[in-house]
Amino acid sequence: MEDWAEKNILNHLKPVEKCWQPQDYLPNPTSDGFLEQVKELRERTKEIPDDYFAVLVGDMITEEALPTYQTRFNCTLGMLDETGADPSPWAVWSRAWTSEENRHGDLLNKYLYLSGRVDMKQVEKTIQYLIGSGMDIGTENNPYKWFIYTSFQERATFIAHGNTARLAKQHGDKNLAQICGLIASDEKRHEAAYTKVVEKLFEIDPDETVLAFADMMRKKITMPAHLMYDGRDRSIFTHFSAATARIGVYTALDYIQILEHLVNKWNVAKLTGLSSEGQKAQDYVCRLASRLHLIKERAQGRPQEAPVVPFSWIFYQKETKLQVQQNGVGEIN
C-alpha cells in the first residue's frame, strides 16, 4: 500500500510554512506590550470554571505524550521507521503527523502557564509520569487494529477540542476558543487520513478488517492517556473522564455516535463475501451502537453520585474549595 499511501495519505499533511504555530496565538515576548497582553489573558481566564480548566489540562497532558504515540505507530507491522528518517510514505506520515500534533501541546501548555490558574509543576510531573508509563490500547502490532483505533481516537479528539472551543466562547474567552478550534481542525484533518486508510483496508481485505474492528470494539476504545498519574491520585484518569462528561466535552453519547459514524463511513453493513467469522463480526459491530444506546438509557434512570474531586493541577477558586470540603473530599493519596 506504499504507492497508494503516498498519493492518498500524505496529501492530508500541511507544509510547515502553511501551518499555524503556537506563537501566533500567544502574547509576544519581544513586544513592549507583552506584560499587558499577559494581564489581559489572565483577566479573560478568571471567570472560567475550575472544572473546565481541569479538563483543558487533561487534554493538554494527553497531547504532550506524543513520544508514546509515535513509538506505538513505529512498532506497528508494516509501519516501521527503521532508521528514524526512512523515506517510506508511512514513516514520512508518522514523523509529520507527530510534528503537527506537537504544536497542540505546546500551545495549550503555554496558554495554561500564562493563565496563572494551573500548578505547572504538578502538570509537568503528570506529563513525565504518563510518558514513562506508556499506553496499552489493545492494538498489539496489528496495522488493521492500529488504524481503526486512530480513526476513532482522532474523531474523539476532534469532538473534545471542538467542545472546549464552544465552552471557552461561552465563558467569554474568544482567544482560547480560537485555539481549541484550531486544534480541533487539525484533528479533523488527521481523522480524514486515518479513516481513508481503513476504507482502503475494507476494500482489499474486508474479512480481516471487520474482524479487527469487532475486536477493538469488544475491548472498548481506550483513551491514550489511560495510564495518567500525577503522583497522588491513582484514579486521576477516571476523575478526568468524569469531568469531561460532566461539562459536556466528551460523553458516552459521543462514543456511541463515533461508532455509528465509522460503521456508516466504512459501509460495514454492506460488506459481502465474508467468512462465517467475518459475518459474525459484521453483525456484532453493526448492532453494537443500538445496544450501547439501550445501556446508556438504563443508566440514566439510576441515581448518579459524582462527588467533586479536586485535581492537583488546579489552583482552585474559593467557591470550589468550599464545595470540595462540603463533599468531604480531601487530598487523594
Image (spheres, rainbow, N blue to C red):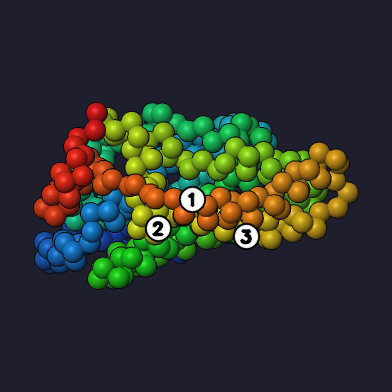
Q: Position of residue 92 (x, y in %)?
A: 57, 46
Q: Is residue 122 above or below residue 204?
A: above
Q: Secondary structure at mark 2?
A: loop
Alpha carbon of mark 1 to alpha carbon of mark 3: how far? 23 Å
Q: Is residue 28 above or below residue 322?
A: below
Q: Are marks 1 and 3 in contact (CB under 8 Å)?
A: no
Residue on which disc 1 sits: 299
* Residue furthest right in the image: 273
Alpha carbon of mark 2 to alpha carbon of mark 1: how far? 19 Å
Amino acid on which disc 1 is placed: Ala
Along the line of sight, which residue is nearer the eye, 80 or 329?
Answer: 329
Q: Residue at x 37, y 67 (%)?
A: 166
Amino acid on which disc 3 is placed: His
Along the line of sight, which residue is nearer the eye, 248 or 122?
Answer: 248
Q: Are marks 2 and 3 in contact (CB under 8 Å)?
A: no
Q: Secondary structure at mark 3?
A: helix
Q: Residue at x 68, y 56 (%)?
A: 263
